[in-house]
Image (cartoon, rainbow, N blue to C red):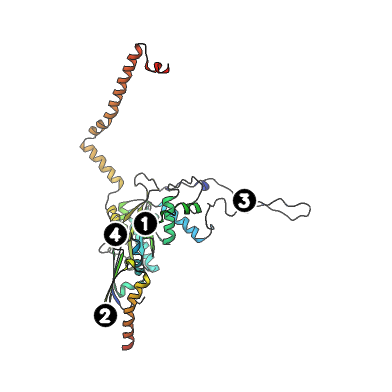
Amino acid sequence: MPPRLPLPALLRAPSTLLPRVRTYASIAHAPAAAPPIARRAATQPESHKAASTRKTQLHRTYLSLIRSSPLLIIFQHNNLRAVEWSALRRELKNALTKLDAASAPLTTINLVRPALFSSVLRVAEGFDKEHRFDNGLAGTSKEAYKSTLHLKETLDLHPLLTANVATLSMPVVAPAQLKLILELMFPEKRSKKGLDPLALSGLQKLVLLGARVDGHVAGGRIGEGRVLDGDQLRALSQLKSVEEMRGELAAILQSVGGGELVRSLGSVGLTLTRTVDGRRKMLEEGASDGKPVEETKAE
Amino acid sequence: MIVRYISNVTIAFNPFSPRARTARLFMSLLPPDARTMMKVNTKVLPRTSELGGSIHVVFKDGKEVKLDTSKMGITDVVEECDRHSRTLQRKDALTG
């Protein structure tokens, strides 16, 4: 699967770090002024906090996670043990690989820091939405933070991000995969049969909170996140895939009489052509009289 | 929080309400092996629900504590539950 995101301009053009200048102490003449020490590498985007701090790195990780996943499920986890997490991840990976081996490794569970994630979500929703990198400012910059601060009150997902939060990101909005994930991790009544007992005790401690669907399922545009609650997410999982729906539509059109539709769609153009043609003939007749319309205007 | 004397917990909350925070924090205070010791029910309320969150705790001696946590902090909720747990604990210690 090709990456959804265009590479930012900074990373596309290979830029070099500041050249290392070697100087020796000498009495004869003052050494040439050394170039100022760069605060950050030229390949590193501008950031409000020091680029090497954990918060900045997490910010960048979360931003890329949000931007690169069309479907992000948000859930609460309550004191799972490490073995339970690994059993759960293993079960999920096995089940998804059976369904679609290509997208399975890209479906990941991430435990996030809720407050930081909420702040990143604001940036993703309100700053450089389509990730064009037009103004040369990264999502970690001070400007990004300031310009999206007003979203704190209005963002629907904001109340979800307290206590212990984890996300499950999917590379595609595929109802079949979603259905499998919901049945495995957030069963409504009885959990799936044949699960590892560790995974079973782990998934009892998970609570589905909501989800964020980014972009258009068929068009693939990004930067228009929509929020779903648990019920809507389950409804989404019951749908057919986009390809199936397209196939059904084509079949319906063929059986009902596609010719009729083509004719009625084409009739608009036909009448327009006729009208314009009629007008042209009228003008030509006027011109043969010796008084073309355009010339009288020019005079 | 003392969880030894709790036999049944029901937690309901609306995740899209900022008032659900206390109920959700209460859920995260239950230890990893809580589900082997007691019965834990979690209920996610619909998005339109007015109620932010509520918890219902049943102790081993049958006492029930019902709280609307929409306007409570987590420390208050823990205090409410621990008050009865402590009396049970004392009773336990005296009978040996």
Give the x, y percent position of residue A87. Answer: 36, 65
Disc 4 to disc 2, C-alpha distance: 37 Å
Q: Give the CA distance from mark 1 to mark 4.
A: 23 Å
| Residue lying at the far right of the rendered structure | A28
Q: Chain of mark 1?
A: A
Q: Which mark is residue A18?
A: 3
Q: Residues within 10 Å of mark 4 (few under 14, many from 20)?
A: some
Determine which residue is flagged by label 2. Answer: B61
Earlier-in-chain disc, 1 versus 4:
1
The vertical placement of A21 against A208, above or below, is above
The N terminus of chain B sits in image quarter = bottom left
From the viewer's side, name the closer residue of A154 and B27.
Answer: A154
* Above/below status of A9 relative to B14: above
Please tell me whether mark 2 sits on a helix, a strand or a loop.
Answer: loop
Tell me where residue B37 sits by quadrant: bottom left
Amino acid beneath label 3: Leu
Instruction: Please name the amino acid that badge 2 sits on.
Output: Asp
Q: Which image quadrant: the C terminus of chain B?
A: bottom left
Whether residue A141 is visible, yes or no, is no
Question: Mark 3 to mark 4: distance in Å?
Answer: 54 Å
**Which SS class for mark 4?**
helix
The residue furthest bottom is: B95
Q: Would you say residue A218 is visible in this rendering?
A: yes
Q: Residues within 10 Å of mark 2 (few under 14, many from 20)?
A: few
Three-letter amino acid code at the position of disc 1: Leu
Residue under circle 1? A157
Place residue B43 in its image quadrant.
bottom left
Mark pair 3, 1: CA separation: 42 Å
Residue indicated by mark 4: A183
Rendered location of residue A129, percent (x, y): 43, 48
